[in-house]
Image (cartoon, rainbow, N blue to C red):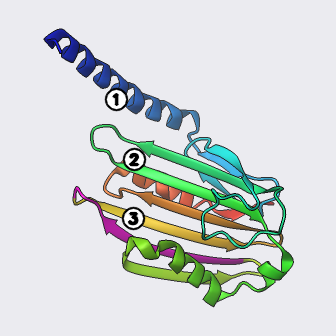
Amino acid sequence: MTFNRILSICLSILFIATTNISSANAADKRYPDGYQYSYPSCDYKLKLPEPPTVGTVWRKSKENPKFLPPSPLDFSAWGEKAFYKRVEIGTLDYIDVKIYCLRAEQDYIIGLNQENMKGKLATMYKDLYLQDIASNFSAGTGSLKWSTISGYTINSEDKIIYHFGHFLSGTESVMFIQIEYTPDNPFFNDQYNLIDQSIMINQ
């Protein structure tokens, strides 16, 4: 490979990196107060820094995460999944958010309690071997319940990665939220705070 070819590749990589960082800042300015994400049949909503990538969650799909509750015996649409991820080129700091909102059977919702909601989150995160694990549970009126888990891991570059899981039950649906990010990056720390502080009932 010639020197000019190598130089061309390096300049292309630099251009892509610069473009990605600039587009992140531009996207943030387009939604100064965050983007309100909600799904019509979901009991909860939250803000994201910008619109996520969304897709349908189909019942009985092999692509569904194992932590999702059992689905009825059909192959219809079950709910929605939403993904938001931003990586800072150069440092490789990042934030990664996954959201699942699913319609739920009344028997399942009524049966949710502190023990099994905390247990579900513990199972979701058991393979990460989180350090300083903390879990919480709160209950509102009726079937409104909210369980959380948090902790951190250290990656191969000795960076701390925070992990947060939310399991929320409503009157007709459940929502799972998974967030991981590098807390030492102020940009992503602010994005996490925006998300975490905006979770509320979808009225």
Left or right position of 1 against 36: left
Residue 32 percent location from the top left of the image: 56, 40
State the separation of the CA atoms marked 3 and 1: 25 Å
Q: Earlier in the sequence, mark 3 or mark 1?
A: 1
For the C terminus, the image quarter is bottom right
* Span of residues in magenta: 145-157
Q: Name the residue under label 3.
A: 162
Helix, strand or loop at mark 3: strand
Helix, strand or loop at mark 2: helix
Q: Which amino acid does label 2 sit on?
A: Phe
Q: Mark 2 points at which residue?
A: 187
Left or right position of 137 against 56: left
Q: Residue at x 62, y 41 (%)?
A: 51
Q: Are marks 2 and 1 in contact (CB under 8 Å)?
A: no
Relative to 188, does residue 143 appear above or below in the rendering? below
Q: Which amino acid does label 3 sit on?
A: Tyr
